[in-house]
């Protein structure tokens, strides 16, 4: 049982509920960020991230930098692309728009390949786009938090390596790393960016990234300096390499307490095979989606192959309004998120199911949420079919 004060179960697509031990790690006494004890903890954390991302290639490099997952966009745009470069952004929701905006801020030309809401660009469309123009990068959101759409990273990567092998493959894994299978080496990915507060299960405040040797060499061969100072790989690469080698190093002060919390959650995650963790999330997701369907509700992602295991985006029934439903659900002890996709934000809600709420069998967050949703819809005048 959790020792946390009683509170509504946070079941949005991040931040998620946190394990007691992880939160206790946040209360670690103050340490020097260049002292041997903290350097050792940070080094172990970076090494564990290799296991989580499934990379054993010594040429790849993990990064952990204070900031949200959004900072990862800046890292990619500032370091892997140069002003005037063309990049292809695969659009599955709100976060593709934002990534494209980030590229444009750095003078990079972002072309979006769109798909209908709830769907993803199809591989033949991607192949056609890659054959029509040379792109420095291609980006894909593994799970778009605004729509719950899951992208097929492995097949996409195989396509890119075949059709446009010089194009770097960048994955936005903010809502996928830690709950969806992600194989950095085997899939030939060049960069993945994520954040601490979702399936990884650590409080918000850390931007977590992995770059391939190919991506790092691309950075080193760029013609112009990076477009950012704080997000410059020139400044951070030697720091991360030194920390992983258990050597003190300094560019900007990290957060020792957040690193301790991340260290704790990674130990917990890696205590069991990753395949088992992914299976638990998949089974929970299927149970949730089956129940929601039995209520007569529809998802934004209608095709099973497009449905994420970390969250579910649910269309509201006619006549039910999110501003009325969500506060009622909170009174019942559950917090869901409203819609985020700008075209249909008022028409749906989002249910996050990842991390400790799913993998801890003692917690009944999912069951509580499904019952609250059923009762809340009934009280809003919708006749639940089940």
Image: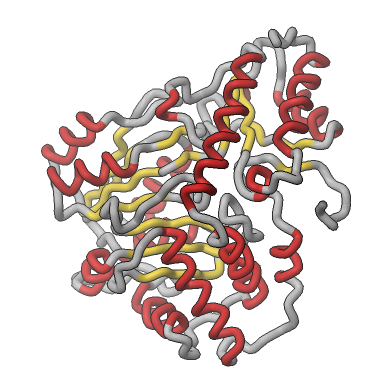
Asked if one can make out residue 195 in the rendered structure from this viewpoint, the answer is yes
The structure residue drawn at horizontal position 56% and vertical position 41%, both measured from the top left corner, is 281
The relative height of residue 123 versus residue 130 in the rendered view (above or below) is above
Image spot of residue 85 (x, y percent):
22, 55
- The tally of labels here is 0
Q: Nearer the viewer, residue 346 or 277?
A: 277
The structure residue drawn at horizontal position 47% and vertical position 72%, both measured from the top left corner, is 46
Image spot of residue 234 (x, y percent):
34, 77
Image spot of residue 108 (x, y percent):
29, 54
- 158 lies left or right of 73: left
The structure residue drawn at horizontal position 42% and vertical position 85%, both measured from the top left corner, is 245
The structure residue drawn at horizontal position 16% and vertical position 33%, both measured from the top left corner, is 128
- 12 lies left or right of 172: right
The relative height of residue 47 versus residue 9 in the rendered view (above or below) is below
Asked if one can make out residue 108 in the rendered structure from this viewpoint, the answer is no
Image spot of residue 99 (x, y percent):
41, 48
Q: Nearer the viewer, residue 28 or 346?
A: 28
- 95 lies left or right of 19: left
Q: Nearer the viewer, residue 339 or 298?
A: 298
The relative height of residue 249 versus residue 316 in the rendered view (above or below) is below
Colour scheme employed for the rendering of this structure: secondary structure
The image quadrant of residue 33 is: bottom right
**Split into 4 quadrants, where in the image is the C terminus?**
top right
The image quadrant of residue 37 is: bottom right
């Amino acid at each position: 049982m959790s020792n946390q004060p009683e509170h509504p179960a946070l079941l949005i697509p991040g931040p998620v509920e946190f394990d007691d031990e992880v939160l206790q790690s946040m209360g670690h006494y103050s340490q020097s960020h260049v002292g041997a004890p903290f350097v050792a903890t940070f080094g172990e954390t970076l090494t564990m991230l290799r296991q989580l991302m499934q990379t054993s290639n010594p040429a790849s490099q993990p990064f952990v930098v204070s900031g949200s997952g959004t900072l990862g966009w800046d890292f990619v745009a500032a370091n892997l692309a140069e002003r005037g470069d063309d990049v292809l952004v695969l659009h599955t929701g709100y976060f593709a728009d934002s990534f494209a905006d980030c590229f444009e801020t750095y003078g990079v030309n972002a072309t979006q390949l769109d798909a209908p809401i709830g769907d993803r660009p199809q591989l033949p469309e991607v192949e056609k786009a890659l054959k029509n123009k040379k792109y420095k990068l291609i980006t894909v959101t593994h799970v778009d938090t605004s729509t719950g759409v899951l992208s097929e990273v492995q097949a996409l990567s195989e396509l890119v390596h075949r059709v446009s092998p010089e194009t770097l493959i960048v994955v936005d894994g903010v809502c996928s790393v830690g709950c969806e299978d992600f194989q950095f080496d085997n899939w030939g990915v060049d960069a993945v960016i994520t954040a601490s507060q979702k399936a990884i299960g650590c409080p918000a405040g850390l931007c977590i990234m992995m770059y391939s040797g190919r991506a790092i060499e691309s950075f080193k061969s760029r013609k112009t300096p990076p477009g950012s100072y704080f997000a410059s790989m020139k400044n951070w690469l030697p720091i991360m390499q030194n920390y992983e080698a258990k050597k003190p190093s300094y560019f900007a002060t990290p957060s020792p307490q957040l690193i301790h919390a991340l260290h704790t959650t990674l130990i917990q995650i890696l205590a069991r095979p990753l395949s088992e963790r992914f299976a638990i999330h998949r089974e929970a997701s299927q149970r949730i989606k089956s129940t929601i369907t039995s209520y007569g509700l529809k998802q934004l992602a209608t095709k099973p192959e497009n449905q994420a295991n970390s969250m579910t985006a649910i269309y509201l029934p006619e006549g039910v309004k999110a501003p009325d439903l969500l506060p009622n659900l909170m009174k019942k002890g559950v917090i869901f998120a409203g819609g985020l996709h700008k075209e249909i934000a008022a028409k749906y809600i989002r249910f996050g199911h990842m991390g400790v709420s799913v993998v801890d069998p003692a917690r009944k967050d999912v069951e509580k949420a499904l019952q609250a949703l059923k009762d809340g819809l009934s009280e809003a005048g919708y006749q639940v079919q089940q």
